[in-house]
Image (tube, rainbow, N blue to C red):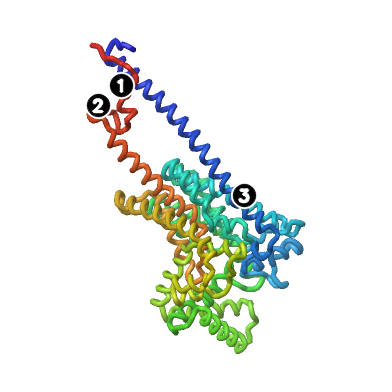
Amino acid sequence: MIRAKSDEEAILYACEVHAALQYKGQMRKRRFERHHLLLILALALASRGALLATIWGTDSASLAPDSPTYLAPALSLATEGSFKTDQQPEILRSPGYPAFLVACGFTGPLGYGITQIVQVLLDVLLVYLTFVLGARLVSPAAGLWAAGFQACSLVATLSSVKVLSDGLFAFLITVAILLLLRYLEEVKLRLLITAAAVTAAATYVRPVGFIFVPIVALVLLLRQRRIASVAGFVLVFAGLVAPWFTRNYLAVGYAGFSSVGDYNLLFYEAAGVWAKSRGLSTRQARQELDTMYRHNLEAEKIEPKSPRAIHLEREMGRAIILSHPTTFLRVHSTTSLNSLLPAGTGLLEMLGVTSGNRGTLSVLHTAGLWTATKYYFGSNITAVLLIVPDVIFLLTQYLACLAYAFSQLGSRGLNWSPAGWLVVLTILAFVLVGGPAAVPRFRLPVEPLLNLAAGAGVAMLLKRRKLIRKNQTDTGPNAWTHSPKAAVLPEMLAVRLVK
């Protein structure tokens, strides 16, 4: 037993020992976090690698209906050095993902196999970035849970092996968000410029990246109140995407970045309004609009896929939407939520258990989720049972998100940090932008952010449960904290105070 000569000496010694115990605990906690993070990354790599090995070399499983629209200009870029489809300048797709395909050597002996391998590795890295997001914004425990959710995310796993731009876009957007979070903390100009450059790169991969710019501008302007920062971000971004606007105008006279928005405006957004206002299925509405569109092309002698044809798509779509604005808002908002549905059907189709492209999305829009589910699965009980784990996982993820969201609203209201606003507005924007075209993979850009909220929710609930247990074992007035170990710390030190 140690006998202190004075109260001051005893207190000093107790503080030193307590600090040493804290340091030891922190080191043990860091080793614990590294160990579990490595296990999570290994799980992510194993699951994605196993799926890739299963479908390796199978076009039907690796390619989606949209894949050829990327492969064709990529082939032109690799063989001719020009960005064309059918010997015509390509304006439907932006060059980001086709250039990625070329960089991965898809014209080589392995075809797009190298692309799939790189995408798997990037997706595992995205799991790590999800941990970094959680650890930076909430806590290391929340980061681990978020990374675990991301590692087990079926929509992310499927996208990592599909020849589509979603996975690469999600990775780049997450990098941009991390850079912006660092900028909000450190206020270093190079971080802001790099974030703008990465956002531009993401927009070249998927033009929907444009919606991220006003979110960043709003957060910087309203929360940081620095107009110079907003101007810097916007100018760097605009300077990097402007060359493609120029290329499209000079090549074919199209004054836009990508015509995919005009196509979706008519054949998805306007088709949804047309179907709702006339009591049709979306498939029937799309067929009627396509007939009308082709008739107008012939009547006005417009060449298909020309700038005038694209302008006609835009004008027809706008006319239908403006004539039914309330219907448009209702249809767009409700169908956008389809991006939050389970992605298990994609795995079933990839493995050949079910078949896709049978008009299920049209049934979903017209008759609702339950009818669409019965239409898709029919009497295939095996497929229903196989999708149950994904449904349970998704419910757990969303319930944890809601728990954390309600907790934050209850404790802070809307008084969030700039980082909080950036996360929330990004989630809302990318979830609600899809409209009638929305499918589960459309939520992939914000899947790390959803998992961040889910991880924070799980960590919060576990912490509260732990605190409740500690309160039950609190020794009362003599306890230093709510921790039972801390409560008996004086006895552990065996210090006797002597006057």
* In front of the other: 54 or 14: 54
Q: Residue at x 54, y 83 (%)?
A: 289
* In front of the other: 411 or 188: 411
- Type of amino acid under label 3: Leu
First in sequence: mark 1 or mark 3?
3
At which x and y percent is residue 330?
A: 40, 73
Left/right placement of residue 478 relative to residue 69 reads: left
Q: Is residue 125 above or below residue 73?
A: above
Give the position of the C terminus as an image quadrant: top left
At which x and y percent is residue 400?
A: 40, 52
First in sequence: mark 2 or mark 3?
3
Q: Residue at x 30, y 12 (%)?
A: 4
Camera-near label (2 vs 3) is: 2
Real-space CA distance between mark 1 and mark 3, rounded to the nearest whole angstrom:
51 Å
Real-space CA distance between mark 2 and mark 3, rounded to the nearest whole angstrom:
53 Å
- Type of amino acid under label 1: Pro
Q: Which residue is mark 1?
A: 490
Q: Based on the displayed image, in which of its 4 quarters is residue 13 positioned?
A: top left
Give the position of the N terminus as an image quadrant: top left
At which x and y percent is residue 189?
A: 50, 46
Q: Is residue 45 visible?
A: yes
Element type where label 2 sits in the image: loop
- Type of amino acid under label 2: Asn
